[in-house]
Amino acid sequence: MESIEYKPTTELNTKTEQSTLKNEKIKKEKIDYNLESNSIKFDNNLVEKLYKNLKSNFEIDFELSHLNNALNGIKMSELKNGKIFEKEMLFENFNCECYDKITISYSENRFLLDIYEEFFEKELDWCPESSYRYSFKIVNKTISDLKLDFMAG
């Protein structure tokens, strides 16, 4: 009896078939990446990375807990769709009327972090203030290209 050699039915015979499969795989990877990036949120880990970058590059007057309180759980996709998140709080560790704000938004492929601070001064009947805007990118769940865009006050 003569033996018959069987070829797998999935064998690709032409370069066109190989190229088509490669393109389909690339499209699927892009779709998977877009789905993943739409579900990425600011979590404790990412907020801590941002805080460490800020602390090592700039003089800041707020704590990790303040940044975490303002950013934790915010979806990147909401920011990229134009939503702005703002949180009012006290950076001081005592009660006073000098409220601070942390705002995050997104513009021109960068995340914008606005810090508005009012400083308690016992001798004054008002709170001196200052504002800062930082911008940064997030690449592979890591903070990159952190800049101080402006400062006033």
Image (cartoon, helix red, strand yellow):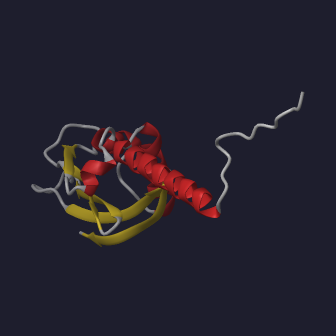
Q: Residue furthest left?
A: 125
Q: Quadrant of the C terminus?
A: bottom left
Q: Residue at x 39, y 56 (%)?
A: 60
Figure quadrant of residue 59: bottom left
Q: Name the one closer to the observer, 97 or 19.
A: 19
Q: Is residue 76 visible?
A: yes
Q: In the figure, is residue 30 to the left or right of 5?
A: left
Return the x and y of residue 7 as percentages of the image width and height: 74, 41
- Does residue 36 sit above or below 22 in this rendering? above
Q: Residue at x 30, y 39 (%)?
A: 69
Q: Residue furthest top?
A: 1
Q: In the figure, is residue 7 to the left or right of 134?
A: right
Q: Residue furthest right?
A: 1
Number of on-image labels: 0
Return the x and y of residue 10 as percentages of the image width and height: 64, 43
- Does residue 94 sit above or below 49 in this rendering? above
Q: Is residue 141 visible?
A: no
Q: In the figure, is residue 53 to the left or right of 16?
A: left
Return the x and y of residue 120 as percentages of the image width and height: 21, 51
Q: Quadrant of the N terminus?
A: top right
Q: Residue at x 17, y 55 (%)?
A: 123
Return the x and y of residue 122 as percentages of the image width and height: 19, 50
Q: Name the one closer to the observer, 14 or 120.
A: 14
Q: Name the one closer to the observer, 120 or 44.
A: 44
Q: Residue at x 53, y 51 (%)?
A: 25
